[in-house]
Image (tube, helix red, strand yellow):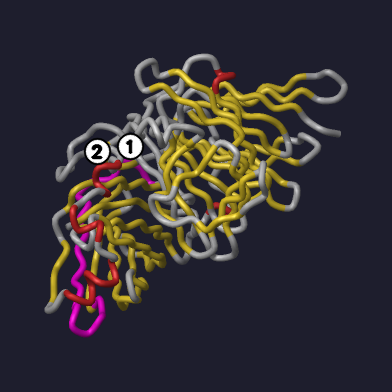
């Protein structure tokens, strides 16, 4: 029995749009912000495949795929942020946007795997945005949500905003289920036959994915801990919409710079001595335990020895202080980091952290996820930009 899903989302806040050149806009859907591992795009008209790397465009006819232990992030034409996890296939059939009118149309299809997105400036009728899935179609107006379709089970997570799921069964009956927006649950498990099972917490399958992208309703700031909105993508897929600290989404111009013309590996090879990255430019942090404050992060790179001898991050929520210490090595043009100690209040914790250089090696974009060892449902995660 197949189901027919339609979703109406109450908008909270849309991301700002960004403009591509007139030449780039011909058929372009967006740009690649990050590609880790095996990330490819196959043109559906010619079946020609190409590897994707940062700043590579994706087009309206592309089927984007990520391999095992791979992930990718994209900034779309309307400013939306789209994050794909490993073993994911996404077909981009149409992505048209007008920054002047905030109108456009989006048609994409999640063939398999997991994605998370913060929608952009396209808004208006729900039909303007259509994300097809094997169990139905999702129409949105502007929110942050996550989908995962694996082994004929669809997992839904609403991190910000409200989704009304209209499920029409083969016998004509209709079931309306609302997630997010102050409802008792923001998560669900949906079978291929259309059976909806509400969940009180993020499904275990969402844990460990480190792509956060959300705007919302808690604490935020730029180099401060003042209150405002929640933002991204890509970052923890294991964190509910109960609390956050953030800044405005890291804009595309943050990735521009004169040193960008020189390969990162060459810039690293030319640098000597040690340098501490500790000036927080932008950030977004969320926690299942409520509002987040006092976020701090720093790391030191020893360019002579190609190591990251020390790094740490910390912040507070209702459960106490989250703290993580990490170190690692420089691998050609990127950092390979591992969390060697983490805690939340009096509880031991675990986690992971990923980073990449931006603006040459002047800045570091990082994303992390942490969880208590004894109670994995207690999680926190985020994204940050430091220099």
Q: x, y percentage for residue 97?
A: 45, 25
Residue at point 40% right, 34% down?
23
Residue at point 18% right, 75% down?
270
The secondary structure type at the circle numbered 1 is loop
* Label 2 packing within 10 angstroms: few (<14), some (14-19), many (20+): many
Q: Is there a contact, CB below 8 Å, between mark 1 and mark 2?
A: yes
Asked if the stretch drawn in magenta spans residue 307, the answer is yes
For label 1, the residue is 230
Q: CA distance from mark 1 to mark 2?
A: 6 Å
The secondary structure type at the circle numbered 2 is strand
Q: Would you place residue 265 above or below residue 361 in this image?
A: below
- Report the residue that reaches farthest toward the bottom: 305
For label 2, the residue is 220
Is 285 left, or right, of 223 in this rendering?
Answer: right
Answer whether residue 380 is visible to the viewer in this image: no
Q: Would you place residue 174 above or below residue 261 in this image?
A: above
- 155 and 187: which is toward the camera: 155
* Label 1 packing within 10 angstroms: few (<14), some (14-19), many (20+): many
- 27 and 217: which is toward the camera: 27
Tell me the magenta residue range: 289-308
Q: x, y percentage for residue 17?
A: 35, 30
């Amino acid at each position: 029995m197949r189901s027919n899903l339609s979703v109406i989302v109450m908008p909270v806040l849309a991301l700002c749009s960004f403009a591509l050149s007139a030449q780039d806009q011909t058929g372009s859907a967006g740009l690649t912000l990050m590609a880790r591992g095996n990330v490819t795009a196959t043109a559906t008209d010619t079946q020609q495949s190409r590897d994707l790397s940062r700043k590579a465009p994706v087009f309206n006819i592309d089927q984007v795929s990520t391999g095992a232990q791979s992930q990718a992030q994209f900034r779309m034409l309307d400013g939306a942020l789209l994050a794909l996890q490993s073993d994911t296939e996404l077909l981009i059939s149409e992505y048209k946007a007008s920054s002047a009118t905030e109108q456009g149309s989006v048609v994409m299809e999640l063939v398999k795997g997991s994605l998370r997105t913060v929608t952009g400036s396209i808004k208006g009728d729900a039909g303007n945005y259509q994300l097809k899935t094997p169990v139905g179609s999702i129409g949105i107006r502007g929110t942050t949500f996550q989908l995962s379709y694996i082994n004929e089970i669809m997992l839904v997570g609403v991190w910000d905003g409200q989704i009304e799921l209209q499920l029409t069964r083969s016998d004509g009956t209709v079931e309306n289920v609302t997630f997010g927006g102050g409802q008792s649950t923001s998560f669900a498990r949906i079978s291929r036959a259309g059976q909806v099972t509400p969940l009180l917490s993020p499904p275990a399958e969402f844990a460990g994915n480190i792509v956060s992208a959300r705007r919302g309703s808690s604490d935020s700031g730029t180099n401060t801990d003042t209150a405002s909105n929640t933002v991204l993508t890509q970052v923890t897929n294991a964190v509910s919409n109960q609390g956050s600290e953030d800044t405005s989404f890291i804009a595309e111009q943050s990735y521009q710079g004169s040193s960008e013309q020189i390969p990162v590996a060459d810039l690293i090879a030319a640098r000597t001595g040690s340098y501490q990255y500790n000036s927080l430019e932008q950030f977004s942090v969320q926690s299942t335990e409520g509002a987040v404050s006092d976020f701090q992060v720093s790391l030191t790179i020893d360019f002579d020895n190609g190591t990251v001898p020390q790094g740490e991050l910390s912040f507070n929520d209702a459960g106490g202080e989250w703290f993580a210490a990490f170190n690692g090595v420089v691998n050609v043009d990127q950092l390979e980091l591992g969390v060697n100690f983490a805690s939340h209040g009096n509880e031991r914790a675990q986690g992971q952290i990923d980073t990449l250089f931006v603006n040459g090696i002047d800045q570091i974009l990082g994303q992390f996820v942490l969880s208590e060892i004894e109670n994995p449902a207690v999680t926190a995660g985020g994204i940050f930009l430091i220099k």
